Amino acid sequence: MWVNGSGNDRFETATPVTQPASHYKIAEAARLSGVASSTLRLWESQGLIAVGRTKGGQRFYTAKDIALIKRIVWLRQIEGLNAAAIRAALSANPAPRTNLASAPISANVGRKLRALRHAAGRTLKDVADVLGITASTLSTFERTSQGVSFKTLYDLAHHFGTTVSELSGERERDGRALVRSGAWRTWPRTTPGITVQVLAEGGRQMDCHRFVLASGASSEGAYGHEGEEFVHIIAGRLEISLDQSDIYDLHPGDSLYFESRRHHAWVNRHDGETILIWINTPPTF
């Protein structure tokens, strides 16, 4: 994990602490990052990552650690950098801090989904089999509200006849007519490397969001629903594919308008943060 000392970013070995429920064991971190557990141990020995440990010495990983690991994967696989070059790249361009003015809306997405599953009389395996995920993945999500892809989050909401916006609690509160810069409320960070900030609150006819994507962050699959969507890139780059046929490489200032029923997938291939405005109408996501 990154800490800041005397103006220079450096790694600091975490002291043993009790593992919070929202953190991941090494096997979960490996699955979420798309690398082997042995690779995570290697990168730790090379000084690329530093993780917390329980009093018993067991490694655990935060969502911030997962985002950093995905960035290292991108630098290794796409840029072809070795360990020394990756360390230099991370030191020269550390992951930006989350805007402290952003307040979370709710952290209970997992519990809400578990309640919906119980009300429907479905087991973890029942739901997991339908969605093509493992029961352990679903169990982790219900417990921590973290650890699923953006696509899986949508699939879960759709499966239970609701939307991600409703699960996040975004539509439960009275909408403010004016939302000041930096005062955006945020969705629960269910997916590492993806921050969704709410630009218009309440039961509106449009879902208006500001996305902040770490390098390598993606939907991890395509999804579609009713409505229309508008995307505008503020910084970085975003690749969006529609129906696996039309692929758009969007740069700052670019906009894209498309029908939501077209199955869309996206990824930040930029070596750095991508920021964009994303609007859905009606609010079916």
Image (cartoon, rainbow, N blue to C red):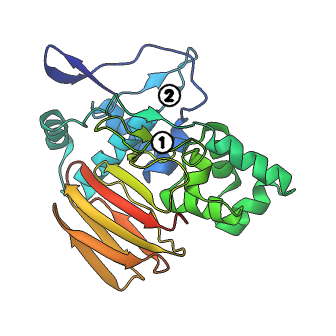
Residue wearing tag 1? 189
Question: SS for tag 1?
Answer: loop
Q: Position of residue 60 (x, y in %)?
A: 51, 29
Residue at (41%, 41%) from the top-left corner? Answer: 66
Mark 1 is surrounded, within 10 Å at the Cα level, by few (under 14), some (14 to 19) or many (20 or more) other residues, namely some
Residue wearing tag 2? 59
Mark 2 is surrounded, within 10 Å at the Cα level, by few (under 14), some (14 to 19) or many (20 or more) other residues, namely some
Q: Which mark is residue 222?
A: none
Q: Quadrant of residue 28?
A: top right
Please state which of residues 82 and 86 is positioned toward the viewer in this rendering.
Answer: 86
Q: Is residue 119 above or below residue 280?
A: above
Q: Are marks 1 and 2 in contact (CB under 8 Å)?
A: no
Q: Position of residue 133 (x, y in %)?
A: 63, 61
How many circles with numbers are drawn on the protein?
2
Q: Is residue 35 above or below residue 29?
A: below
Q: Quadrant of residue 97?
A: top left
Spatial CA distance of label 1 from label 2 is 21 Å
> What amino acid is found at the position of numbered circle 1 in the picture?
Arg
* Quadrant where the image shows the N terminus: top left
Instruction: Give left or right: position of 84 versus 73.
Output: left
Residue at (82%, 55%) from the top-left corner? Answer: 123
